Amino acid sequence: SRCVVTGASRGIGKAIAEAFAKCGADVLITYVSNKAKADETVAEMEKYGVNAYSFRCDAGDEEDTKRLADYIKEVFGSIDVLVNNAGAIGEEAPITQITSDEWDRIMRVDVKGVFLATKYLIPLFDKERTGKIINISSVWGLYGASCEVAYSATKGAVNSFTKALAKELAPSGIQVNAVACGAIDTEMNGHLSDDDKASLAEEIPAGRFGSPQEVAKLVKSLSGMNSYLTGQIITLDGGWI
């Protein structure tokens, strides 16, 4: 199979890309600034004997996304799986301190980016097989987080996008689901002190953060599910929320 994972030079995206490669899938990842990390991810995937590629694409840029679609058509012809993982996080701040520029930045990447990748890559799905679109979301898109209004709003949008698109694409044999992540041990949480991490882990019934590999395993399993599973927001949070 052929899989595209956006924003996969590190963290959850990298783990997802490697999980697909490990199972023999050819994978193309996108990155926006860290070419060295993207090259590392490609090298890791190639160890499994698959075809692996990276492509620089600013998720919120339409021309970049059109070029991405052209490149995918060139190297893969068609695709079977699209994982929309590319995303930005906002600063933790009260809503009165969020600037319009900050709001626009996070909306551009987290919402418009998912729209653009989906719009331009849907025509590349293999017509002979069922396609899978899996969006990486957050529990805050379902429940909201104080002082993270912008981020919560983008993930709420991704969840609604997932449900609506699933209905639209079901007749075409393409399934659309999302994984709403809880606290995952990535660089995104790197700003937390050890004490903050420990107290947060205590709030989680599982008693710990999730790992990127656990997200990847769930995404990989969703890509192999039957076609009746669609439009679902699956929460992976250790029983936290």
Image (cartoon, helix red, strand yellow):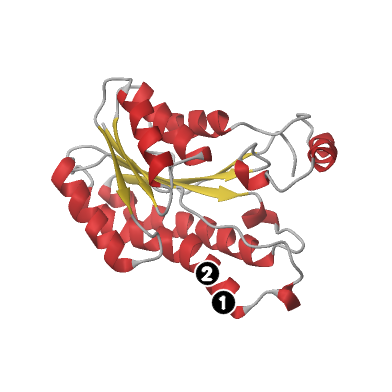
The image position of residue 140, as x and y in percent, is: 66, 54
Asked if disc 2 and disc 1 are in contact, CB closer than 8 Å, the reply is: yes
Which quadrant would residue 146 be assigned to in this image? bottom right
Tell me the kind of residue under disc 1.
Asp
Q: Is residue 70 left or right of residue 108?
A: left
Helix, strand or loop under label 1: helix
Tell me the kind of residue under disc 2.
Arg
Q: In the rendered view, tell whether residue 78 sits above or below residue 48.
A: below
Residue at which label 1 appears: 101
- Of 6 and 155, which appears nearest the observer? 6
Residue pictured at 20% horizontal, 42% vertical: 126
Q: In the rendered view, tell whether residue 161 sits above or below residue 174.
A: below
In this rendering, the count of numbered labels is 2
Confirm whether residue 211 shows in the render.
Answer: yes
Residue at which label 2 appears: 105
- Of 131 and 13, which appears nearest the observer? 13
The image position of residue 100, as x and y in percent, is: 60, 79
Which quadrant would residue 227 be assigned to in this image? top left
- Of 141 and 128, which appears nearest the observer? 141
The image position of residue 75, as x and y in percent, is: 17, 42
Residue pictured at 30% horizontal, 23% vertical: 24
